[in-house]
Image (cartoon, helix red, strand yellow):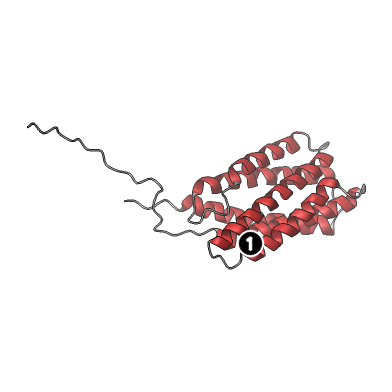
């Protein structure tokens, strides 16, 4: 029996790590330079959401060994692609929408990561509590982004940067601790060669 192809798994894991680092870098940039143009922010994050959505879809269909990190990523990946497309369609008018949409997306992902942390504990993954703690922190920041406690665009941009940084660190932790790839993983469905059974005459 042939082993499962691991290329999609490696693409999904590497893509998650790269996008995590991108979000971390964007978060630090927004915190350090909150006066960036809304047009630049919208275009950059709209593109990032689409790319990350595609990575999540690849992860969902890659079927790594534990199947923890990407188990909820079919719907979430499609949501990110749709939100990214909406932001890119009207980048100059989408800043308010972007804050709320990203806040909801980050809060939703954090809640999914709480479940992943609980499942990781059952699998015996020692870093499950780190994922849980990061998910709680990320969820709180995402919730704050949804309710937008300040009217100042600069302060909201700093909050957006904090949310992206928290999301990046959380996704990086999950990708490194729960995505298990083995070269000898078997397919889910055992392929059986068809054969004909001849009737025996009595």
Residue that protrudes farthest toward the front in the picture = 202
Give the left or right position of residue 20, taking residue 199 as reference.
right
Residue that protrudes farthest toward the right in the picture = 151
Give the left or right position of residue 61, taking residue 128 as reference.
left
Residue that protrudes farthest toward the bottom in the picture = 126
Q: Position of residue 91 (x, y in %)?
A: 79, 38
> Which corner quadrant of the image does residue 175 belong to?
bottom right
Q: Position of residue 9 (x, y in %)?
A: 50, 53
Residue 119 is at least partly visible in this image = yes
Give the left or right position of residue 107, taking residue 11 as reference.
right
Residue at image position (75%, 38%) is: 87
Nearer the observer, 106 or 114: 114
Residue at image position (83%, 59%) is: 32
Residue marked by disc 1: 173
Kind of element beneath mark 1: helix
Residue 35 is at least partly visible in this image = no
Nearer the observer, 2 or 65: 65
The number of numbered badges drawn on the structure is 1
């Amino acid at each position: 029996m042939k082993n499962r192809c691991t290329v999609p798994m490696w693409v999904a894991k590497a893509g998650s790590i790269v996008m995590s680092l991108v979000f971390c870098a964007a978060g630090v940039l927004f915190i350090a330079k909150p006066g960036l143009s809304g047009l630049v922010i919208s275009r950059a994050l709209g593109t990032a959401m689409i790319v990350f959505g595609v990575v999540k879809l690849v992860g969902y269909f890659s079927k790594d060994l534990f199947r923890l990190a990407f188990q909820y990523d079919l719907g979430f990946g499609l949501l990110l692609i749709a939100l990214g497309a909406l932001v890119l369609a009207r980048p100059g008018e989408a800043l308010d929408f972007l804050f709320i949409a990203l806040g909801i997306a980050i809060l939703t992902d954090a809640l999914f990561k709480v479940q992943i942390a609980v499942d990781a504990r059952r699998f015996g993954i020692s870093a499950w509590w780190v994922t849980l703690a990061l998910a709680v922190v990320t969820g709180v920041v995402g919730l704050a982004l949804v309710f937008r406690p300040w009217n100042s665009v600069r302060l909201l941009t700093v909050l957006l940067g904090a949310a992206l940084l928290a999301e990046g660190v959380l996704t990086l932790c999950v990708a490194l601790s729960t995505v298990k790839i083995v070269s000898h993983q078997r397919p889910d469905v055992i392929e059986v060669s068809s054969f004909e059974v001849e009737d025996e005459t009595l």
